[in-house]
Every structure is written in structure tokens, then in C-alpha cells.
Amino acid sequence: MSRSPIALLLIAVTAFLTCATTLASAKTPLFKYRGLHPLDIGLGEVDGTVVGFLDWNNDKQLDLLVLDAARTRLRIYLWQTHKYGFKAAAATPPISSLNDAKIDNVVISDFDNDGHIDILMQMQATNGVVDMRIAYSQPDGTFAVVPAGATTVPPAQRTQPFVADTTGLMVPEMIGVAANRPDLAADALSRWVFYPNRTATTTPLTWGNQTTAPVCDLPSIHSNAFVDLNGDCLPDLFLTCRTAAGEIEGQVWLNRKDAGFELARRVALTLPERRHMGQLRFADMDADGTLDIVVPLCASLKDGVGRDCVFRILYNTQKPICDTSLASLVSTTPCRPVDRLCEADDAFMLGGEGNADAVYPLADVLAADAATDVGLVLQSSSRAGSLPNPIRDGDVNNDRYPDLLFVTRQSDGATQAHLAQNTACSGNGDVERDQSAATPSDTSTSPHIRLIQQRCKAARAKHGRQAPRIAFAPPDDAERMVTLAKELAAAGEEITAAHFLDLDGRGVMDLLLSLHNSGTGRVRTLALYNDLPMDAFFLKAHTVGDTCGLPCRTDLDPDDAAPAPEDPEDAEGDADEQKARQVAPEGFFAAMAAEASTSSTVYGLTNVGATYKFVVFDTRGRERPYQAAQAPSSAYMAVPLPQANMGLSRTNNHIDHFYVGTARHQPRHFTTYQGIIPNSHLIIVPYQPPGTDDPSTWLMELYLNPSSTTWTCFQVLVGALLILWSIIYVLHYHERREDAKERQRTLHAINFEAL
């Protein structure tokens, strides 16, 4: 008998056992049909709302920060891959607000620059100011909240500050209007500076030769952001300010590094017939390599519900990437080469001509059987008061075009979560070929594709070349999603929040719904597992803080730290002085940096303002640019994901040019990587040794499968190899015995013939 077929059979059996056992150990849900499926992830009995995403235990999986129904306590829930659900972190007790104050917002960052996650709580006080307290992480896995009587975070006036990094020191700060500052003009912006000894001060937001801070009348719920809008991979300031006429405008302050920020654009956000605005989203809606702005607008607003609402998209128009065809060689149109994607275009336009064409009525993006009198929920009410309820963006089918998730209220008072799938229109008013291919369904039977075709052709016939670049329609599984939510909601429950998240690091955006029971006051969380049909790739990128690359210790004692300056004027100084104070402080923290042993990367930290740009080839060989931002907003329940989740659609090649930009004030604030494999998770550590300004020292880790089943797979593989070796040894042993017997018979035959 030949050995080759047996060996091939054994290798096939080994591969099958390895894959089957690995899948079984991960407990990945399996369903009979494709679509959105309800999934118990261990939060059904948890009384609280998800207010934050983080990686607390450093396993590269998303964990949750949950706020209880009374809005006074926070608790961390860890993802358990082997159980495919969340479980409360036993070693981390709940975090309580001071004096039972109600928590309005949560910001997750590293405020003391020790390389570990801290949690800032923002609470609305009775005197119209915003109180803030920080829970600092401790070496034993607990949090320490600075006592109420101690010097903590100065309060803000009326509105919540947001996280930014205007100094370029890779240290989080906050921008807003400070309270109790009679030395500043009304509505003058201030900067909150945080120190390693766990204190903070406020200083006027000034730079360069400027002596006065910008003035901005912030709306009661604003959408300020730290995000790149001119394409140079350097985050800019986007402020929403109220004008003297009562309108809301967006101000774009371009980042000039050490020269400060320059006011470059003012854009009207509201429309004359729709003055009530929800919170903005920053995403590359038309997948052209620039970040657009999605503005929800309503004609009226009552009890947090807007009526006669639309989604207005301010397209960001910049220089396109250079075409590689022969016709482009004689073209005089300005363009960006693929090897210079982070080249600034200060002539960018937000909106411009044809603005009205980018307005999508809410009724057009709802399911066909939805009621006509449907309102957009901008604020959700509960027993403990109302909270903002922003729309969310995420790519549910990985086709490069971000989709929208939002909550509506019917005329009968019932609430519903809706998913508006974003699809590109081609030049002739049809659906982009790659778009229809990314969702492998027959276009003749797909309601989504048919509806998109109708809307693209109607827009083309009405507006010609000024027709909108994209169209929204419910996905093919939208009707079942509506039915599911109705069936899952118990009597007296209403949906108060909806989120995108990636369960178990699969690279697919699942849905998370929070339901509030008006009778009992309890809030529970359900998940909809995304098993929609798709034939596309993804890419996840996460830029962490730079302190985790430095030698650091975890046995910090705030009492041993150098004190912060008492006078706010002393906190200004120049950039070098601030860097010496925040990155290399004196006293205990200087000794910590000099003597400590190296620490592993802290994957839970998120670098504010990180930007990603890349070019991917579609199936027709065309270069497709894309841009994404990492956690651009942080105020008013923005609840950003710590990493950027990007769909690649269908591609038959790796990513040649992948750019990562940060807020660093140095000649080259970005770096580029080549040969990135699709369906991977990138973790970028922008560490630079002291005294250097070269991003070539940044570290990049690539994970093809970030799940925690690798060890199980290795164990199964080793076990299978041992079994295979045993079988081969037994077969070899039996074959040697047969050979010996054969030789013995031959020898007997020879001896018999000799006789």
C-alpha cells in the first residue's frame, strides 16, 4: 500500500479537526440564514446604559463601560471570548460619582500621562456649570477618585468641554468655556491642562503671538471635534458656534502646528426651514478620501424628538488622487499622488454648490412600511433625566461607504432603531458595480438594490451632473430588524440608544441597543449579531498613546509628585516648557521614567486626533482612496470606538500606501506603511525617543486574527501532530514487521531450494 494517500488523508483530517475545534472553542454563533440576529451577550440583566468602549484588560478586545439607571455609578464589563459575551470585571469595583451627582458624559483617556486608562466624568451642577471628576487607574485594577475637597478639575460654563491636543505633545487636554474666570471675555475658549500629579488648571486658548482666546457661543449640545478636514493627516479644530442671528455655524480652524490654529472656513450648518440640529458625524460618506460631515436637521423639536427631519451631508471636496492613465499626463487639474496622500489642500470646500442636493429626508431612508409621522430621537428620556442620542456611523457590509444608525419615535409613541444603508450612485444614475458586488445578492430580487437604483436615477434625472453621490435605503433585512426590535422589547420598554461595535474582533459591525422600561426604570442592553451577506474585506486601525513605549511603572503615588503651578498664568509658557512639565516632570515622575523597567503596550489607550488615509484597488483595477478618523468627538455621549473600523469592499490586492497621522508638532507628523494585508488589525504605537522628531521609530503591530483562540488553536495543532506522529509510528512499526516476515519467508524459500 502506498504511503502518499495515507499521509494526505491524515493531513486533511488534522486540518479539519484543528479548524473545527478552534471554532467550537470560540463559541461563534451559527445561524440557519443570513441577516441580523438577536444575541445574548450577558447584558440582558444589567441595569445600565453603555457609555464607553475600551480595552481594559489589554486583550485587544472591546470592553464596555456601563452607566447604571440612576446615572451615579460606572462599571466595566469585560469581553469573554470563550463565552461570547460580557462579564463584570470582578477585580474592578464600580466607580461612583461624588455626592451622587448624575453623570451626563464620560471621557476615556490617559489624563495623568502614566500610560494607563483614566475615566473623566462630566456632571451638570445646579448652578449651570459642568463639574468634572477623574477616576485614575490604580496598579491593583481599581480606580481612585480625587476627594471632593481637593483641587481637581476646574468646572466648565454651561457646556461640556471636548478632548483635543492643540499643543502637539501627545497629551490629552480639553477645550471649552471655563467657569469662574472673570479675567476672560464671555464665551472665550479655554484649555484644560492635566498634570502627572493628577491636578488640572485652565488657561486661555491662545497660541503664537495671539493674546486673546477665540470666542464661541457654544450651543447647549454641541458637536465640537478634533479632526483632519484639509487632508494633511493633522487634526484640525471644528467648532459649532451660535451666531448673533441665532443660527449655528461650523468653524474650521486649521492646525498650523507651533503657529497655532487659523480660522479657514465658516459654514452654515442649519437650513432656514430646519433650525433644530442634532449631533454631527464625521465620516467619508462618499468614499473619496476626505471626511464629510453628516448634519441631522429637524423643523421642530419637542421632548427630544425632532419632526420633519433630514440628513444633510456637507461633502468635503479636495484634490482627487492622480489618475495613472495616459490621459492624466496632459491634465492640468490639481491632484494628489498616491505617495503624497497627506499633502494639504487648503482650498477644500465643505458643501459648496449643489448643497440642497445632499439633503436626504428621513422618510426616504426608513422602511417602506414605516409610518409617515415619524420623528428622529435626538435626546432619550429615562427615570434619571434625558441624555443626548446621536446618530451613529459604521460600515455594516464593509463596502467602504459608512451607514447610519439612529432611533425614531412613531406617532403612537413607540420607538424603533433603523439602519440606513449607504450605497454609491454611478455617473449614469445606476448603482456602482463594486457596491452591488459587495453585497452578494441578486439585484433583481434585492429590495435594497432596486430602491437605490430608483433613487439614483431619479436624482440624476432631476439634477443632472449635480446629482448626489450616494443614496440611502433600508438594507434587505430592514423589515426583519424592525420586527425583531418590536419582539425583543417588553411591555413599557423603549429604545433609548443604539451603537455600532465589533463583537469578538471579527471585523464586522454588530448592533447594540439599550432599552428603558418606563414602569420599572430599568435599562437593559441587547445585541443584534451582524450576519448579513457580504463579500468584502475590512481593516481595523488603532493608534495608542506614546507613553506605553517609554519605561514606566504602575506603582504611582500622587503624593510624591511635583505640585502643579498655583497661578494659571504660570501654566501657559512655550511648547518646550509645557513638554518638560508634562512629559518629563521633576521629582518622583522623573525618577520613574529613569529607573523603571519596560512596560508592554497598553492597547486600551486611544490617541486623540489620529487620522488614517489609504488607497485600495477595486476589482476593476481602479485606485480608491479612503480616510477615517479615530475618536474625533468626545462630548455629549459621543461614545466613540477606540479604533477606526474601515471597510475595503472587494479587492484582489494588499494596501500599498497606508498613512497614519497624529497631532505632533514636528516637520513630519505622519508615517506610511506598505503591503498591509486586508482583514487585519493594526496597532500603531507612535513612540519617539526623547529629542527626536522622526516618525520612523513608530511601532506597528499587525494581527490577522486578534481573537484569543490562538492558544487553543496551537494546542489542538500540537495534539493533532502528536496523534499523527503516533499513527505514522504505528504504521511504520507494522510495515517493518511485515518486511521482516517477508525477508524471513524469502530466506526459508532459498534454504529449501538449496536442500
Image (spheres, helix red, strand yellow):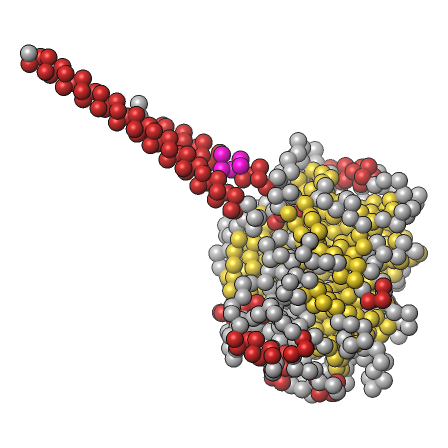
| Position in image of residue 363 (x %, y %) | 84, 47
**Residue 121: horizontal and vertical position, in percent?**
77, 66
Q: Camera-side residue: 250 or 582?
A: 582
- Residue 669 lies within the magenta run: no
Q: Which quadrant would the C terminus be assigned to in this image?
A: top left
* Residue 332 position within the rendered picture, expressed as x and y whole percent measured from the top left: 57, 66
Q: Which is more toward the observer, 500 or 249?
A: 500
**Most foreground residue, 553 or 658:** 553
Query: Is residue 363 or residue 158 the one in the foreground?
Result: 158
Q: Please say whether residue 456 is visible from this viewpoint.
A: no
Report the span colored magenta: 17-21
As drawn, 200 above or below 53: below
Q: Is residue 102 left or right of residue 82?
A: right
- Residue 475 percent location from the top left of the image: 73, 42
**Could you tell whether 424 is left or right of 23 in the image?**
right
20 within the magenta span: yes
User: Vertical placement of 213 versus 84: above or below?
Assistant: below
Which residue is at 55% across, 63% downward? 601
